[in-house]
């Protein structure tokens, strides 16, 4: 056994501030006197204010905050990320920070990992805010517009980051100023900060509506792809890459009767082909998605949960439905989108808390300008973290894991098994069942029961299998609520955490083993790693795997993978940056039109004679309202077209490398050109319909003119974790001559 990086200790940050807070005592005051002191105190006197809030928390919850919790709260109030170990009370630290900032007049959004945690934490802490005369609320997926308006008016709001992001995007579709949700971007306090700020930062939030289905064409292409010969396509599921050989391109062109697949006019067809290939060869059922009630549900790779509001990009989602022979549904068109990173950067103060952030400190600083403060546990961690167990084969690894489970189970020690996919969870579940070992499985199939499963995972003889522990939000207490059972489990060694292979990020490993050894509890952990593991095979050949210092080399591979993922996120943000600037520009313009801050005045400027005629017949109000209706409508339509165009350009922009050009520079040029064209198209369409539609003093009958937007919208997140940027070198090293020639043709096209 060794002391690992997971147990590094540190001194308490802001110890002087914490000492000043603890110098105050308010226990002799009654409630009215305490409230009076809160209302009258100098809110800039931070130690005084924190001491008052500390007393309120004690009276409302019965808990006296540890110094570490006060330190974490102060760290967040300074705009930092506080790393506080699992089980140390991060939730109350967040309450202290939120209360302090809200009392100073700021609107605070506590952004959680999911709706369950938003509702739970609101119910746990609303009495604290109420005591301080602060209003609080929560938002979840089923909240209606009135509930959301009321929530955003509160001093403190609990909501998942994506819920607030979706509400922000939906404002873009409003045609009536009364429908706008007033979202104040004062403070965002992010729970599970590394998971949201890092792992989900690359994921665009999307608001979309129905459009004409292309399922017939996708079905035809899927059938063509399904019956390709092995020599026609090369793919690698571990790296999520594929490419066609010369024979494969010829096969597709013959099947679709195309003379050149890579001509500009075949762009949509190529999009459908890519979607069909990815769905059939790269996406794996029960790993990347589940089928439930006749629908496709995307699985979050970081948690193993069903992502109820997430879809694959439109054509890809349909391609998966076609592959699984499900009833086809309408394709969706994206009306607005923003990467989670850029949405969170809208807040004036961005801060957060997590149990695992220090390993991503550099990336958090680069992406958000956030520093990380490491807060030690209030009681030193005594968990035993054993060296990684290296196995030659997957079979040997599985057998050793089963052996360890039996050893722990026989003495009553609870076991938590961390797997890397839903499929792997179910494989271990079958193995345990075959060996008569009772257990619970925590994954995408029974997500609703997760809180109860986790709460009981520390009881004697319990065996729990989890796909991922990030964002679960429930502590594993030894013995549950029973002190007698807690003593039994402590004597058995505490919670034993087993990692079924290392993850692509050491943070995820830390999130897993951090469930053991909370608040000075005993515990144990070890990772079982097979030499056949995909992560290892990507970096090591056989002779290196047999060399000395194997454990260090394996962890080095993990670090390399972390770096590659960080580079991919950085590249995605560079591509998204120009779109974000343009989204801000078009959103500001649309808001000004919607709120009557400005009028389009297209007709006055470009057809003054017709403008004068309408002034004399329907009045200036009718003209301006009609132009407003049309401008709002065509902004939405053309912005959706613009996003679709830029997505297609981005999917193929890396091909310009063949011509010696910089992909990002070319993408930015294309974005500027496309945005300029969009502005012209909006103006042109507004003028055309102002001339052809019937205008009255009330404006234009949009429905009668056939100018209605989507009848329904949906929100989801596009998973871009498997992106093209990380695989460019491999692609071009193996690119067939025929493809290279044709890509050069594409590079010379107007796009």
Image: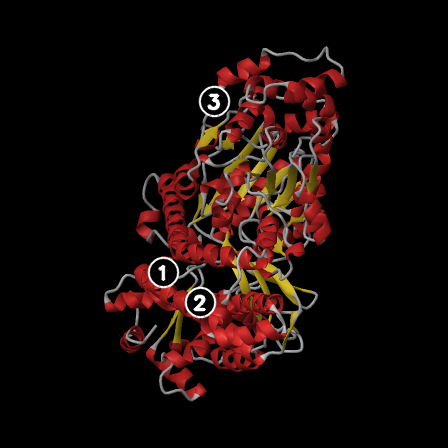
Q: Residue at x 44, y 34 (%)?
A: 358
Indicate which disc residue 592 carries.
Answer: none
Q: Is residue 672 above or below residue 741?
A: above
Determine whether the residue tagged by mark 3 lies in a helix, strand or loop: loop
Quadrant of the image occupied by residue 70 = top right
Indicate which disc residue 727 carries.
Answer: 1
Residue 667, x across and y down, in percent: 35, 63
Between the C-alphas of marks 2 and 3, the distance is 52 Å
**Mark 2, mark 1: which one is toward the viewer?**
2
Residue count near mark 3 (Cα–Cα under 10 Å), binned few <14, some 14–19, many ≥20: some
Question: Can you say which quadrant of the picture contains the C terminus?
Answer: bottom left
- CB contact under 8 Å: marks 1 and 3: no
Residue 280, x across and y down, in percent: 51, 71
Q: Residue at x 47, y 54 (%)?
A: 584
Q: Is residue 647 above or below residue 571?
A: below
**Is residue 206 among the parts visible in the rendering?**
yes
Between the C-alphas of marks 2 and 1, the distance is 35 Å
Determine whether the residue tagged by mark 1 lies in a helix, strand or loop: helix
Disc 2: which residue: 679
Disc 3: which residue: 13
Determine whether the residue tagged by mark 2 lies in a helix, strand or loop: helix
In the image, 702 versus 366, the foreground residue is 702
């Amino acid at each position: 056994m060794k002391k690992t990086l997971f147990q590094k200790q540190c001194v308490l940050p802001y110890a002087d501030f914490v000492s000043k807070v603890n110098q105050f005592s308010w226990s002799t005051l009654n409630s009215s006197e305490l409230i009076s002191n809160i209302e009258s105190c100098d809110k800039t006197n931070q130690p005084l204010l924190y001491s008052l809030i500390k007393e309120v928390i004690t009276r409302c919850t019965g808990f006296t905050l540890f110094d570490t919790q006060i330190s974490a709260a102060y760290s967040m109030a300074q705009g930092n990320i506080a790393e506080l170990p699992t089980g140390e009370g991060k939730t109350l630290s967040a309450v202290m920070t939120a209360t302090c900032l809200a009392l100073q007049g700021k609107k605070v959004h506590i952004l959680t990992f999911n709706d369950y945690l938003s509702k739970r934490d609101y119910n746990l802490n609303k009495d604290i805010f109420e005591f301080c005369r602060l209003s609080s609320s929560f938002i979840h997926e089923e909240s209606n517009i009135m509930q959301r308006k009321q929530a955003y008016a509160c001093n403190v709001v609990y909501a998942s980051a994506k819920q607030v992001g979706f509400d922000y995007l939906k404002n873009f579709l409003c045609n009536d100023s009364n429908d706008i949700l007033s979202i104040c971007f004062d403070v965002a306090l992010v729970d599970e900060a590394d998971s949201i700020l890092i792992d989900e930062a690359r994921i665009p939030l999307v608001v979309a509506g129905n459009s004409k289905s292309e399922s017939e064409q996708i079905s035809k292409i899927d059938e063509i792809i399904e019956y390709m010969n092995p020599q026609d396509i090369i793919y690698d599921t571990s790296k999520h890459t594929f490419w066609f050989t010369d024979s494969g391109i010829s096969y597709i062109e013959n099947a679709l009767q195309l003379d050149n697949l890579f001509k500009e006019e075949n762009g949509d067809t190529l999009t459908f082909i890519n979607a069909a290939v990815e769905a059939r060869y790269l996406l794996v059922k029960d790993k990347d998605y589940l089928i439930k009630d006749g629908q496709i549900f995307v699985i979050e790779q970081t948690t193993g949960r069903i992502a109820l509001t997430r879809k694959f990009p439109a054509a890809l989602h349909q391609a998966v439905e076609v592959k699984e022979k499900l009833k086809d549904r309408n394709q969706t068109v994206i009306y607005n989108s923003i990467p989670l990173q850029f949405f969170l950067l809208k807040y004036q103060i961005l801060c957060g808390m997590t149990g695992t952030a220090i390993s991503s400190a550099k990336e958090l600083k680069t992406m958000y300008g956030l520093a990380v403060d490491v807060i030690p546990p209030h009681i030193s961690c005594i968990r035993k973290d054993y060296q990684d167990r290296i196995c030659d084969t997957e079979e040997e690894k599985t057998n050793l894991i089963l052996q360890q489970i039996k050893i722990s189970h026989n003495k009553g020690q609870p076991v938590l098994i961390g797997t890397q996919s839903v499929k792997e969870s179910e494989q271990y579940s079958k193995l345990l069942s075959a060996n008569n070992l009772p257990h619970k499985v925590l994954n995408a199939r029974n997500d609703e029961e997760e809180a109860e499963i986790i709460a009981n995972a520390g009881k004697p003889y319990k065996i729990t299998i989890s796909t991922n522990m990030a964002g679960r939000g429930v502590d594993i207490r030894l013995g549950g609520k029973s002190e007698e059972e807690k003593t039994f489990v402590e004597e058995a060694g505490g919670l034993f955490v087993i990692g079924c292979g290392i993850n692509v990020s050491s943070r995820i490993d830390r999130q897993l083993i951090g469930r053991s050894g909370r608040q000075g509890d005993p515990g144990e952990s070890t990772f079982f790693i097979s030499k056949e593991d995909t992560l290892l095979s990507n970096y090591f050949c056989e002779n290196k795997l047999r060399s000395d210092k194997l454990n260090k080399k394996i962890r080095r591979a993990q670090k390399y993978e972390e770096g590659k993922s960080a580079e991919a996120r950085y590249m995605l943000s560079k591509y998204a940056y120009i779109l974000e600037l343009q989204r801000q520009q078009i959103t500001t313009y649309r808001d000004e039109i919607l709120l009557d801050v400005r009028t389009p005045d297209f007709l006055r400027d470009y057809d003054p004679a017709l403008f004068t005629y309408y002034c004399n017949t329907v009045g200036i109000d009718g003209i301006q309202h009609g132009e407003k209706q049309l401008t709002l409508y065509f902004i939405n339509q053309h912005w959706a077209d613009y996003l679709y165009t830029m997505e297609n350009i981005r999917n193929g922009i890396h091909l310009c490398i063949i011509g010696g050009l910089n992909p990002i520079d070319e993408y930015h040029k294309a974005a500027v050109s496309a945005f300029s064209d969009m502005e012209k198209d909006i103006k042109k369409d507004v003028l055309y319909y102002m001339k052809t539609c019937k205008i009255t003093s009330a404006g234009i009958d949009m429905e009668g003119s056939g100018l209605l937007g989507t009848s329904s919208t949906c929100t989801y997140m596009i998973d871009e974790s498997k992106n093209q940027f990380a695989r460019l070198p491999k692609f071009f090293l193996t690119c067939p001559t025929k493809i290279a020639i044709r890509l050069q043709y594409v590079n010379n096209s107007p796009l």
